[in-house]
Amino acid sequence: MKRHLIVIAAIVLAGLGALGIRVVLEGRSALADGDEALANKRPGDAISGWEAAARWYLPGAPHVDEAYDRLLEFARTHKSLTAWRAVRSAARATRSLWTPHAAHLAEANAAIAELSADDPDAARASSNDRPTRLAWHQDRLADDLRPSPGAAALAIAGIVCWLVGIGVLVRRGVDARGRLARRPVLVGLAITVMGVLGWAAGLYSA
């Protein structure tokens, strides 16, 4: 029985490992696409590629920090509103119960407000007073500090589903004779995979 539980745990870990590998591969591919676009003097496509790389978030994955470094350097150097918005979008998309890049999000919000305030037509509050426009943009950006309720609910449901699937595997994956129970194993794996996908979709769409 103990050996069967080890096999089940190995299957679950292998699935999570495969998901992690895909995230890293997709992130590094998007990062390379962004670098290539910048080399070909296509800054808009470069920003899009780096943002996509940052959105393929996995704790400790080097492509995430590299993507933020590129976005931040471009945004600061060129005072690019598009790049700052990409930083903000990526930082918001990878939030869950915490914000992994809270400092970058705060810096992006401040920069977006400053740059937008320089355009008198950028605020609905028609005012020729820059401080008024700046305050308006700051308030607008501060309104959305958390993931959308739908995305948060999807991520939480995914985590619950994930745990339920693992519970099914552990408790019902082996029958009374110490053999793998095929149906419960398949059900547990399906629930676990659905949970992981739901969690990832919730984080990505936040």
Image: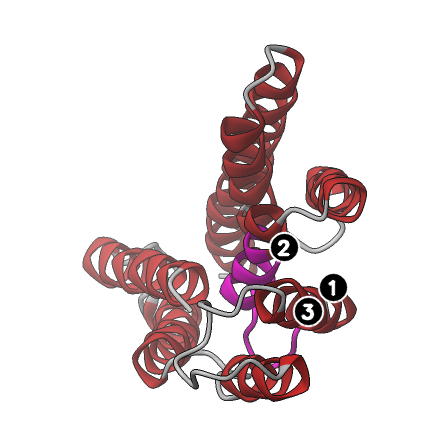
**For discs 3 and 2, the disc positioned in front in the rendered view:** 3
| Residue 196 location (% of width, % of height) | 40, 60
Query: Of the residues under marks 1 and 2, which one precedes in the sequence?
Result: 2
Give the structural element (helix, strand or loop) at label 2.
helix
Residue found 69% across the figure and 45% down from its top: 64
Say if 176 sits above or below 132 in the image: above
Query: Of the residues under marks 3 and 1, which one precedes in the sequence?
Result: 1
Say if 55 sits above or below 35 in the image: below
Q: Is residue 179 magenta?
A: no
| Residue 1 location (% of width, % of height) | 49, 61
Q: Which mark is residue 104?
A: 1
Q: Which residue is mark 3?
A: 114
Residue found 59% across the figure and 26% down from its top: 34
Q: Which residue is mark 2?
A: 84
Query: Of the residues under marks 3 and 2, which one precedes in the sequence?
Result: 2
Label 3 is placed on what type of residue?
Answer: Glu
Alpha carbon distance from label 1 to label 2: 9 Å
